[in-house]
Image (spheres, rainbow, N blue to C red):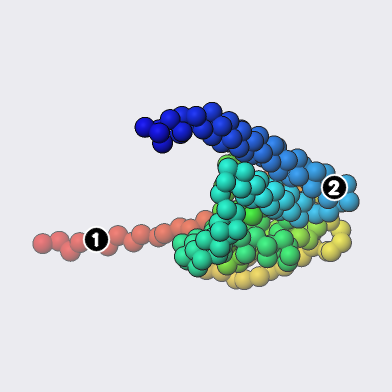
Amino acid sequence: MENLEGLLKQLPELVMGYGLNILFAIVIFFIGKYLSNVAKRLTAKVLGSRKVDQTVVSFVANLAWALVFVFTVIATLGQIGVQTASLVAVIGAAGLAVGLALQGSLSNFASGVLMVLFRPCRVGDFIEAAGIVGVVDEITIFSTKLRTGDNKVIVAPNSAIMNGTITNYSTMDKRRIDLVIGVSYDADIRATKEVLTKVLDNNAFVLKDPAYTVAVSELGNSSVDFVVRPWVKGSDYWPARFELLEQIKIALDDAGIGIPYPQMDIHVKAMPSQ
């Protein structure tokens, strides 16, 4: 009874002490969470004002947020009485197990660092990687967001991108369109070449330098194949390709030059009469 009475007498002090600690811990957590967001925005603003590549800006800003948030969690636990030194020791002892359990995430993090350092692609680039074709919207610590041509957002792990082949269509400002145009064997080769050349000369997308190529590439089974290889700006690749195909078909039709298509001859033999 005496112990109980003593505990009841100390209860207000205990509630006041622990209550204040918990209250301060909550305040520290929310302030730290707010500061982590501020650190992210401030880092992005400072790097952006110095015209740093957007890929680096996004990655470093997310890293700054993560660091401040980790310190916030440690400070919050320390306020409520958790021995942070012991906590760090426990984390260090469990590091191997956690590393094995999260080796996929660690691989994504390492790949993210490599993407920032070596820059195989940047935000805004049109790439093909990990079986995905799209524009890079954001590179984060663990993943990369890609926007496809039909406006879908695909989040791919960084390791999947870095461990495979990356085709960057935006690195060079000029791209070559490779077309194969097959015409009939009855068509005049010189006339056909003249028609194709005229189409390229009159097309607004086709660049004068480097010069385009129009040449016979193969005498196929049912057609004479021409290669048509104009150079265009990288941003104009698909509009130029679609327009050239349409214009070539119309020009060949107007010139009376046929484009053969696969045909099959069937010979029916009469059955002998019984």
Among all residues in the image, which is located at the extreme front? Answer: 2
Residue 272 lies left or right of residue 252; in this view the side is left
Residue 51 lies left or right of residue 162; in this view the side is right
Q: Report the front residue among 228 and 17.
A: 17
Residue 46's tag is: 2
SS at badge 2? helix
Looking at the rendered structure, the kind of residue marked 2 is Val
- Please determine whether, in this image, residue 236 is positioned above or below residue 181: above
Residue at 41% x, 59% y: name it. 264
Asked if one can make out residue 244 in the rendered structure from this viewpoint, the answer is no
Residue 270's tag is: 1
Looking at the rendered structure, the kind of residue marked 1 is Ala
Crowding at mark 2 (Cα within 10 Å: few <14, some 14-19, many 20+): few
Residue at 66% x, 39% y: name it. 28
Q: Which circle's residue, 2 or 1, is located before the other in the chain?
A: 2
SS at badge 1? loop
